[in-house]
Each structure stands twice: as structure tokens, then as C-alpha cells.
Image (tube, helix red, strand yellow):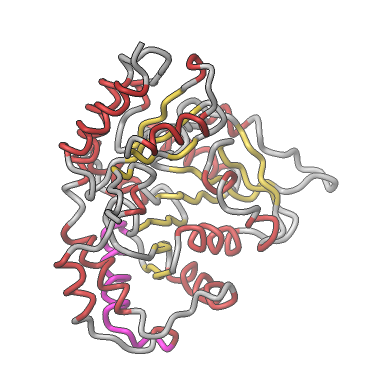
């Protein structure tokens, strides 16, 4: 039976390692990373820390682990952490903060995923013994559920100044910080300098098969390394996978702009179709959120129909679906996907 071929727009995590990346992984020098002896892991950590302008970095298996380790280091049991309502840490990390760090999340709805000083100021708990202490503010750049939107640097600076005055730390979920940097021309370090810790991902748009990094001061990373072990993230000859991340970091950054161009083209065409609504202002990088409310159909039903026509997307809520563009989707694939949408959503 002939295998079906799909245009896979579910996520930029579905990318496969290239031939060059596979070769780099096969030839990687390795050692025991728990003993700090894997040369490839050490090289990756040094390069990531330098690129983000921080003292140290820690290679971890996933972005969720990076974020959860950061929360664990920054907080003590009973603290409260402010996050935007649609943040990945709140929506997609399986209640990790309450399970692993015994903290609760205070969610605040922002515009395009962005919180302002006023939003945060109104969310800080009063200093009373019966209130949790507001210990940490987490931002997300780019913001996944908002449609890959970029956090304005000027607002980040304002938030940093305010939180420092309140003795509140800041963590950045920068899984797609690379996309924000390429889209704006602002170097990752220019974003990172305003945060106490940053997580970045290699297995999304950069195309590595696995891995993220947590970045911060030497003392922060020393604590993070301990919790990585506690959470089961201590790896041995991890240089094999670190080599894929290192190759991605050195070779696949600039090409992210191609994914942004694909997303903008797709959004512009699909937004013209009846029953579909796209906030084109939110299409800033490689993610497109499509509101299907006017079709009178659920996202699940629409996704099934698209799949039967060879295009894979994911749901972003009962009446929203999401398309993500990446290195394994060509512009020809994007044009074909638009044709499928026109077929499915014709008048």
C-alpha cells in the first residue's frame, strides 16, 4: 500500500535532522556529562551562554524541563508566579509548577501574549502573612498561543525595571527566542540581559531532534544542575544529541526568516476565505492562528477534513486551529496547503 504523504503544519517540532546534522551527531566526541566530561555538551553550553550574554548554560532534554528547573531555582514552596494566561508554562506543562515546586501560578490575560507594567503591578500580592509571595514573573517570546508574537523589547525593559524595584525575578520562556531575534534583528543577548534566566529550544525551528538549554549566572546554573538530576535529566554520553543542537545553532538560525515568509504568505491567502478569520497583526514569525467560529464547525471536525485532504494542523482551542511553518515545509508545500484550504472552505 502506498504511504500517504502529508503537508505537516502541526508544529516546528516535527522537523527531521538533515544529512549534515546526522553526520555531526555520528562523529560527535562524547564523555559522561553527569561528570561534566562530555566535550560536545560543554562546547554547546559555552556557545549558548555566550550567544545570550550570560555566564553559564545547562543542556537539558526538553523545554518543559528547562522552564520547570528555572521555577524550582527561583522559588520556594508557597510562592506565586505571574504568567500570561496563554503561556506555555500554564497551558502545556501538566501543572508542573504545583507538582514540582509547590507554587501556584497567577495568570493574567495580555494583548497578543504581552503583559505591561500595569498588568503586573495589579497582580502582585500585598505583603500579608496570609497571602502567597509574588516571587517570579515569566514571559514568553515568541508567544505560541498568541500566534508567534514577539515581545517588544521596550516593554521587557520596563518590566525589568519595575520587577527589580519589587525584588521579583524574571524568567524568559524563550523556546522560540531565535525566531524573535531573526524577525527583529535584535540579538538574543539584548533580550536575555533583562532576565535572570532564559530557556531556549533547539528542537523547534532550528531542526535538532532533541534538546533545550537553560541559561543564567554561574550560581543559578549550579543550582539548576542539581535539580536537573533530581528531575531525571542527568544524561551520560549526551554529546550525540548535543551535536545536533550545536549544528542547528551554527547553521539554521538565519534561515528562520524563510519560515516567517511562508507564514505570512499562507495567512494572507487563507484570511481571504469565507468563514475564516486571522489576526494578521499577530502573524509576526512562523505561527498562524486561524479562527473558525464563523464556519459553525468545531476545530476537531475541520482538522479531520483537512487531514483527509493531506494537510495536518493542530487545534488551538474549540474554534481555533494552528499552522506552524518550518524547514521541512517548502514554499511549494505551502502553496499546496493553501489550495487545500480553498477546496475545503470554498463558498
Q: Quadrant of residue 97?
A: bottom right
List x then y, in percent, for residue 124. Answer: 67, 38
Task: Examine the rendering and report whether any part of residue 151 can be seen.
Answer: no
List x then y, in percent, for residue 8. Answer: 32, 45
Residue at image coords 38%, 56%: 200
Q: Is residue 137 above or below residue 207?
A: above
Give the side of residue 149 with respect to residue 65, left or right. Answer: left
Quadrant for the C terminus in the image: top left
Q: Mainly helix, strand or loop, the magenta region?
A: helix
Per the image, is 42 magenta? yes
Query: Which residues fall within the magenta stretch?
Result: 35-53
Per the image, is 189 magenta? no
Q: Nearer the viewer, residue 183 or 167?
A: 183
Q: Is residue 43 above or below residue 320?
A: below
Q: Nearer the viewer, residue 40 or 210?
A: 210
Residue at image coords 41%, 47%: 194
List x then y, in percent, for residue 225. Answer: 49, 75
Amino acid at each position: 500500500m502506498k504511504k500517504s504523504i502529508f503537508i505537516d503544519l502541526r508544529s516546528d517540532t516535527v522537523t527531521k535532522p538533515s544529512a549534515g546534522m546526522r553526520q555531526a551527531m555520528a562523529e560527535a566526541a562524547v564523555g559522561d556529562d553527569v561528570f561534566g566530561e562530555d566535550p560536545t555538551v560543554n562546547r554547546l553550553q559555552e556557545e549558548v551562554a555566550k550567544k545570550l550574554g550570560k555566564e553559564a548554560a545547562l543542556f537539558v532534554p526538553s523545554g518543559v524541563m528547562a522552564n520547570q528547573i528555572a521555577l524550582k531555582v527561583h522559588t520556594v514552596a508557597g510562592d506565586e508566579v505571574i504568567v500570561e494566561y496563554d503561556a506555555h508554562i500554564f497551558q502545556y506543562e501538566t501543572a508542573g509548577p504545583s507538582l514540582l515546586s509547590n507554587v501556584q501560578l497567577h495568570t493574567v490575560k495580555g494583548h497578543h501574549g504581552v503583559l505591561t507594567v500595569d498588568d503586573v503591578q495589579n497582580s502582585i500580592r500585598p505583603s500579608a502573612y496570609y497571602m502567597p509571595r509574588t516571587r517570579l514573573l515569566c514571559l514568553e517570546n515568541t508567544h505560541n498561543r498568541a500566534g508567534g508574537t514577539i515581545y517588544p523589547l521596550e516593554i521587557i525593559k520596563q518590566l525589568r525595571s519595575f520587577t527589580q524595584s519589587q525584588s521579583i525575578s524574571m524568567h524568559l520562556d524563550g523556546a522560540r527566542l531565535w525566531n524573535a531575534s531573526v524577525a527583529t534583528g535584535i540579538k538574543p543577548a539584548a533580550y536575555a540581559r533583562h532576565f535572570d534566566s532564559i530557556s531556549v529550544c533547539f528542537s523547534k525551528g532550528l531542526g535538532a531532534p532533541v534538546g533545550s538549554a537553560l541559561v543564567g549566572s554561574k550560581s543559578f546554573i549550579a543550582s539548576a544542575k542539581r535539580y536537573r538530576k533530581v528531575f531525571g535529566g542527568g544524561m551520560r554520553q549526551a554529546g550525540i544529541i548535543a551535536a545536533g543542537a550545536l549544528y542547528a545553532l551554527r547553521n539554521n538560525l538565519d534561515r528562520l526568516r524563510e519560515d516567517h515568509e511562508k507564514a505570512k504568505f499562507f495567512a494572507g491567502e487563507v484570511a481571504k476565505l469565507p468563514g475564516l478569520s486571522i489576526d494578521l497583526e499577530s502573524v509576526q514569525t512562523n505561527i498562524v492562528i486561524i479562527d473558525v467560529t464563523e464556519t459553525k464547525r468545531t476545530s476537531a471536525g475541520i482538522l479531520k477534513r483537512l487531514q483527509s485532504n493531506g494537510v495536518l494542523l493542530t487545534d488551538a482551542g474549540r474554534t481555533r486551529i494552528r499552522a506552524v511553518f518550518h524547514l521541512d515545509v517548502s514554499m511549494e508545500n505551502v502553496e499546496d496547503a493553501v489550495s487545500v484550504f480553498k477546496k475545503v472552505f470554498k463558498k
